[in-house]
Image: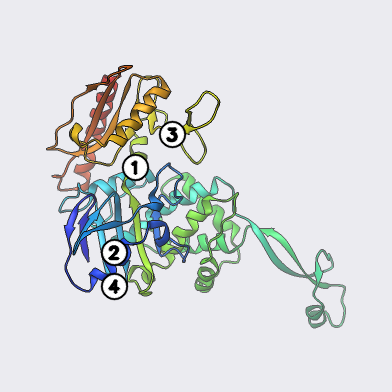
Amino acid sequence: MIKVEDNRTVSVPSDENWDNLKWLAKRPISNLGADDGGSLLIFPQSFGEYGDKIGDEYIFSIKEEHRIQTGNIMGFVGYNGTELSICSRFAQKEGDYFLHYMLQKVFAINLFDLKHDFDKESVFDFLIFLFPAFLKRALRQGLYKEYQTRQYNDANVKGRIDVSRHIRLNTPFGGKISYSTREYSFDNKVTQLVRHTIEYISSHSLGCNILSADEETKEAVALINTATPSYQRSDRNRIISKNLKLTAHPYFIDYLDLQRLCLQILRHDEIKYGDDKEKVYGVLFDGAWLWEEYLATILSEFEHPRNKTGHGRKLLFTDGTGWCYPDFYNEQMVLDAKYKGYEDWNKVQNADLYQVISYMHVLKLDRGGFVVPVSNDEKQPTTKLLNGYGGQMSVFGMHVDKQSLTFSCFVNKMKMEESRLQESIRGFA
């Protein structure tokens, strides 16, 4: 396995892996994440939902012969025998604590019992910890239902009479009629897939803890179990096959993500070891999206707009046309989350500067800035004053510790750093 960090230029061996790496580098992520049964799981799952362009991005690019440039994409990907693990640039020798900590915060899960090496073994085992969050989010849209063809043999005819089956079952005639009808049912291929995933997770050593982490999770599991009375363990492969063509019901849109995750979990060994050599498999996270969603868990004093719902968007023109989605804003300032190394002003890209200045103008604010992750040994830029209408801009760096020997120690340091960041931002207002 080839192991690299995000936002780095690295050399790779000049062996048979190079051709596979070049193949991966030429294809945008949206092309790699086709609906092929969930072989490649990508976060965020809905391209463009958060104002990002992850679907148009590449996992990495080729800089020159046998050198690749990684970006904000992290995780694990495999293709045709070549396996690449991309950890965060803040990873320690003991493991990628920063990546796992952000995942813990964003998905509200407990990772203290996990291995923290982001290799092909742990990355797929990790998926079962995401299951409760996806299940609860899907069920908030209601229990999934779809039309099913049911066969009956009784006196209450309410569908199409099945003549051949009627003759077979009701000769001599005893008052019953064989018929079939299409009706809504909660017991369908999607809920069956979720039920099989629940049963699979329950057999895991930590399954009981995962499926009973909180009352909402326990209620969700019980609801699925009640809705799937026809569950049979022997039907697992058939149910998986029926779900390989993903459901895209416009009302139950969050079930699409749950369906992908369930397929990934249930096809654990097949995907993990890359039995289908022609398919791309793995789990990828957009670091920019993950960083922004993590900050949303600690910057509770700010509005955090959502592209999907239109919540928090701001109009650009007085006639109601055009809009923008600042990452975070309140009555005092607007902040942009950047998963980049902005340890000094020379490294702040002009496009990012213009973006925040535009936000300040539209929102009529005289405070703006960036929130970025930085290493402990990196300095933080000073506040600068804007020309023209005036205003101040700053870069707020969250120091990510790279010396912690245990994940629990890292978590404690991050909590202190979160408090320091909050105080710094308040002091800027």
Question: Label 3 vs label 4: CA separation?
Answer: 41 Å
391 lies above or below 77: above
Helix, strand or loop under label 4? loop
Q: Name which residue type carries label 2.
A: Lys
Between 267 and 377, the residue placed more toward the observer is 377
**Proximity of marks 3 and 4: CB atoms separated by less than 8 Å:** no
For this orientation, the residue located farthest to the front is 388
Residue position marked by numbered label 4 in the rendering: 81
Residue 233 relative to residue 230: left or right: left
Helix, strand or loop under label 1? helix
**Proximity of marks 2 and 1: CB atoms separated by less than 8 Å:** no
Residue 393 relative to residue 245: left or right: left
Q: Disc 4 or disc 2, which is closer to the eye?
A: 4
Q: What residue appears at the point 35 percent right and 39 percent down from the top-left corner? A: 292
Residue position marked by numbered label 2 in the rendering: 120
| Mark 2 residue crowding within 10 angstroms, few (<14) / some (14–19) / many (20+) | many
**Proximity of marks 3 and 1: CB atoms separated by less than 8 Å:** no
88 lies above or below 11: above
Q: Position of residue 118 (x, y in %)?
A: 26, 57
Q: Name which residue type carries label 4.
A: Gly
Q: Disc 3 or disc 4, which is closer to the eye?
A: 3
The quadrant in which the N terminus is found is bottom left
> Can residue 116 be seen here?
no
Q: Name which residue type carries label 1.
A: Lys
